[in-house]
Image (spheres, rainbow, N blue to C red):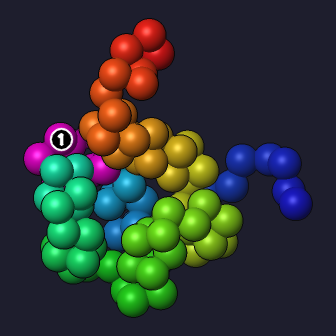
Amino acid sequence: MNAHYFFPPAAAYPLNRALFRLKSDPEYRQRFAADREAAMAEAGLASEVREALAAFDRDRLVGLGAHPYLVFMAELRLKMDRAPAAFEKF
């Protein structure tokens, strides 16, 4: 595994944009939590990407060009929304 930063490929822009929105956009995150398929369709994600994102399979997402930071933060924000008390001292 290459330990250095990599630049995500241009083809992964929709995935990284969706992850950024999950991290930063409460309304999009709420729509994703309520109906993942609809939110992923809204983001224009390919079926292979949808499958990996629905499962939040970090290794597959990174393999598809997702930035690791965005994968981590998007999943963390979803977890924070589901159980805010678990993160009150975070």
Using the image, determine if residue 8 lies above or below residue 81. below
Residue range of the region highlighted in magenta in the rendering: 21-28
Main secondary structure of the magenta stretch:
helix
- Pick the front one: 55 or 12: 55
How far across and down, in percent of the image, does residue 27 sit? 11, 47
Residue at 44%, 48% in the rendered image: 75
In the rendered structure, the answer to whether residue 61 lies left or right of residue 24 reads: right
Using the image, determine if residue 62 lies above or below residue 74. below
Residue under pointer 1: 26
Residue at 88%, 60% in the rendered image: 1
- Pick the front one: 80 or 27: 80
In the rendered structure, the answer to whether residue 43 lies left or right of residue 27 reads: right
Residue 4 within the segment the image draws in magenta: no
How far across and down, in percent of the image, does residue 51 sit? 45, 81
What secondary structure is marked by label 1? helix
Q: Amino acid at mark 1?
A: Pro
- Pick the front one: 32 or 11: 32
Using the image, determine if residue 78 lies above or below residue 87. below
- Judge whether residue 56 can be spotted in this image: yes
Q: Hey, which quadrant is residue 39 in on the image?
A: bottom left
Residue at 60%, 61% in the rendered image: 58
How far across and down, in percent of the image, does residue 3 sit? 84, 48
How far across and down, in percent of the image, does residue 36 sit? 26, 69
Residue at 57%, 66% in the rendered image: 57
- Judge whether residue 23 can be spotted in this image: no
Using the image, determine if residue 81 lies above or below residue 87. below
